[in-house]
Image: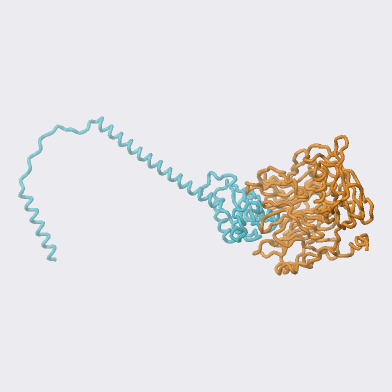
Amino acid sequence: MSNSRLILAACATVLLATACRPDPPPPDPMPPTGPTAEELERMRQDSIRAAEEAARLERERMEREAEAARERAAAAARRTLMETVYFDYDEAAIRPDTEERLRAKLEILRDNPGVSMRMEGHADERGTSEYNFALGNDRAESVIRFLTGFGLDMGRFSSVSYGEERPVAQGSTEGAWAQNRRVEFVITAGGNNLGR
Amino acid sequence: MTRGGARMLAGIATLAASFMVSAAGSAAQEEEAAIPGVSLGFVFEGERIPPIAIRPFAGGGPASEIASIIATDLDYSDRFFVRDSLPAGVDTDGIQYSLWDQYGVDWLLTGSVESEDGVAFLAVELHDIVFTSIRSRARFPIPPRGHEGFRLAVHRVSDAVVEWVHGEPGMAASRIVFSMRPFGNPDSKELYVVDSDGEGLRRATWDDDLAVTPAWAPDGMHIAYTSYKSGLPRIYEMNLVDGSERTVEGGAADGQQFSPAYHPDGDRIAFWTLEGGGTKGISTYNIRDGCCLTRLIGGYYQNIQPSYSRDGSKLVFLSNRLGSQTPQIYVMPGEGGDAELLSPYRYGQGGYFADPDWSPTADKVAFAGGIVDRRVYNQYHIFVRDIETPDNRIVRLTSEGNNEDPSWAPDGRHLVFAGARSYGYGVFVVDTATGRTRLLVAGVRAADTDWSPRLSWRGDGVATGGTGLEPEPGDSR
């Protein structure tokens, strides 16, 4: 309470001091020096042009970013579509991790009905080379069956088997075999306009 | 006792291998014991192998090379024991039977290269040392050395010698086709052809893609196979003489076609297809007339790898109808029908049997496989099931590595197969009567072996162009 009273007293002192100062002399009379009507009009036009230019640049920036975002999304969609899926030894059954990847593909395939794909089935080196052609195709067909089971058109998919002839990993270890038991995906149509 | 008596006793005596696999390691033994119908590994018929000597051929020029080719052929026939070091002071004119008798051979082959009107002939005589007489003699036209028909013509002589003694010709005049990775191209496989003695390896396709599952036509002039060169695996038949090509018409546009097998009539092929929507199965097609695509067997399960019996009345094939991981071999009528299990299967045990091939001379089926532990590699072996024996006896012919794709030689006695060993891949030949095995050719990822019928050079020893794969007249395979 005593603090606020002190501040009020200080203010009153300042106000009195100001009131005691003499008036300044009046300024000399000057002719009016503002822009002419033409100048004003030019400035107005300039400001409009500047605003339009700024708006255009912003629009282009936004379009570029939207396009980049679309491309990022399309690239992500393409990556998702082309992500390889894997299988157990001598099995064409869909494993949980494979199902997860196929469900991600399913979303994209639903949103992009123009996309067609080829499923390329592979097998590891175990077993006879010829049976592995059949096994690789069983895997490709298993993937197609999964997708068409959700209502996608069978006509969008084709399959080819490479058996054990195109391994991605060399060597006779479980690690190499696991990488080779797979279905790879090739987009055969509609891959340029992927969207969500 | 005379050696005549010895030879007569030979059919009774069992001198050759009659060994069992029990000493070959416990793992193999357990695997064997697990296959019903397979007693124990190798049990070969006893057979006395008659010794033969080849006297240096007269006539100079290619004579010594010809004799050397024949010596190797007779050795590889597994029907003779070839004495390769001859006694000093060997007779060069006339036959001193007593000398050769002392040397311990049953047979002596003599020969000379003769020229008649610019054409070379090989005249050979087969002497029966035991009965001191000439068993057979014949003259064979031989193209000049270096000519591509030269070795084939000499192989024909070897096969004739086998026939003179054993009543059925050998398999020297034949070739083997197989697939192999060409050097520097890890993504492709091409077809290669090699003579039965491992000579003359040459490339047969330049598809620059996967060329697999070849089959030699009964006429010896065509090879049908699967190539990915169009983007999809499709069957092509190449004419080895004029280079022309045929395809299977009328199938599904997206159809994948594998593993052609010729009907003994040489016109039809059986093969297996994979089509869109999961449609698949074994079909036949008349590749000569280009017609009549017929589905023999279809269904949900895989039915693949057909092979015709020698008269075409039956078809042996692989099916996984018992479940994945248990492909088994079945037999059905050649025109389709009910299938019976042929491979040794016991409920609950699994087992993996594949690559069936029906013998061209008997009711025997060779196949690959075994009781397979999924964690173990290198467990596929070559088996032969003899359907003519009452107990459907099964013999195992390999003891190491991983073995696939057995195919019968035209003699119905030898098998060629693709084998993986710790030291690499190769094409091997095994004699089903003695178990003797030799490496035919080493190759990266060699597979899909198929043995040709008997082949002969066209014309009278004169170059006729082409590849010279003319069938022997009356050859039934």
Q: Quadrant of the N terminus of chain B?
A: bottom right
Position of B88 with respect to B419 (left or right) is right
Q: How is the image coloured?
A: by chain
Position of A17 with respect to B54 (left or right) is left
**Res. B284 in view:** no
Give the answer, above or below, for where B184 lies relative to B10.
above
Give the answer, above or below, for where B24 lies relative to A22.
below
Give the answer, above or below, for where B466 lies relative to B399.
above
Q: Look at 70% across and 59% down and name the residue there.
A: B402
**Res. B133 in view:** yes
Chain painted orange = B
Residue B208, position in %: x, y? 66, 43
Total number of numbered labels? 0
Instruction: Tell which of B98 and B187 is nearer to you.
Output: B98
Q: Quadrant of residue B83?
A: bottom right
Instruction: Tell which of B293 and B187 is nearer to you.
Output: B187
- Chain A colour as displayed: cyan
Position of B405 with respect to B387 (left or right) is left
Q: Look at 61% across and 57% down and name the residue there.
A: A171
Residue B336, position in %: x, y? 81, 54
Residue B68, position in %: x, y? 80, 48
Residue B324, position in %: x, y? 69, 61
Among all residues in the image, which is located at the extreme top? A38
